[in-house]
Image (spheres, grey):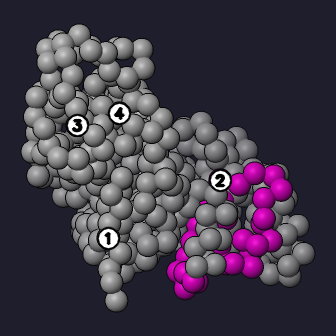
Amino acid sequence: MTETPPPRRARAEIDLGALRANVRTLRARVAPHVRIMAVVKADAYGHGALRCARAALDAGADWLGTATPHEALALRAAGITDVPVMCWLWTPGDPWDQGIEAGLDMSVSGMWALDEVREAARATGKTARVQLKADTGLGRNGCQPADWPELVGEALKAEADGLVKVTGLWSHLACADEPHHPSTAAQLDVFRSMLDHAEEAGVRPEVRHIANSPATLTLPEAHFDLVRPGIAVYGVSPSPELGTSAELGLRPVMSLKGSIALVKRVPAGHGVSYGHHYVTDAETTLGLVPLGYADGVPRHASGRGPVLVDGTVRTVAGRVAMDQFVVDLGGDEPAPGTEAVLFGPGDRGEPTAEDWAVAADTIAYEIVTRIGARVPRVYLGE
């Protein structure tokens, strides 16, 4: 059987061996009783949800987490049926009935959601697994402390009626990626208070959790029964303040690569790409990389994005276009087809996702997540 050659225009190489190693690293950071939920929302931060979910489970993850119910249902449909899967971003009219049938853990932040899940439970004749989310200070989803007693009380009534089982109590941190930020300790205090109220009222959760990637790595007091690492699973540092991926014991999973499509010599004073924001100051060579913002290369990194070509890090010359960008090769003439590495682990001299985040004035989460479907994923280490 002939092997399929790797895509030449562009590809995102996904190192599942690195992902498994990251999960094992995270496992070593938490106490033995603490379970790990590998978050695979947004197609596993652009890495491919199904393959990454299976690799994370192989490495010892206990739960999977998604944002939307449709992401969670896709995992179930693909055959992941014997592990808990939680999803937390529900809107009115979402498929609560399908979530119940699939045995999902479904987050409830307010009375409208509890009403809908109770109705769906009656319709299906099955008990819904729900987790009550507390807003401890992030100010997004979640139930405010003032409304918590009503939500807890109504959830317990629904549990007594056999409509729901409250499997979890949870929240989310706002500033765990900023070491020693005072809001983190404040949120943990509020969370403990809301846990106490719920448990005194009679809730017996399977899991209590608040820790995201940075809290998993640096805040053992936030681990409770379960931690929810997301970006750390994919080997990306949650923030520069916490350290690099290597300093945290993580290895980036995604490498974004393309092939040089054209090399040409141009004179001094030659404009490059739309708007001529870059003009050559001497005779030079230009290399065309067939990746653009339609593939997820951030236009904000125009003139700043780093690319490794033939052993030298070059910089995007001029604007990133929809399908392509240019690098100034400084007179070098690599052959068409030469590999251009936008980012990877960084240990071979290539830029990292964090480098692109700096170039685009954003965070590394966005850099990997935005890589689009037009870029084939090539999986290594399966």
Rendered view: 317 above or below 10: above
Camera-near label (1 vs 3) is 3
- Amino acid at pointer 4: Phe
Q: Give the Cα distance between marks 1 and 2.
A: 39 Å
Q: Is the residue marked by circle 4 packed among few (<14), some (14-19), or many (20+) residues within 10 Å?
A: many
Give the camera-side residue of 130 and 378.
378
Is the residue under label 4 in contact with that under label 3 (CB below 8 Å)? no
Q: Which residue is mark 4?
A: 325
Tag 1 residue: 5
Secondary structure of the residue carrying numbered label 2: loop
Return the residue at label 2. 89
The answer to whether residue 290 of the structure is visible from this angle is yes
| Residue 86 is inside the magenta segment | yes
Disc number lying in front (1 or 2): 1
Q: Is residue 163 left or right of residue 145?
A: right
Horizontally, is 136 left or right of 253 in the view?
right
Mark-to-mark CA distance, 2 and 4: 36 Å
State the residue at coordinates (72%, 71%).
Answer: 99
Mark pair 1, 3: CA separation = 23 Å
Q: Callout 1, which amino acid? A: Pro
Look at the image and give the residue range highlighted in magenta: 79-107
From the image, tell me which residue sits under label 3: 263
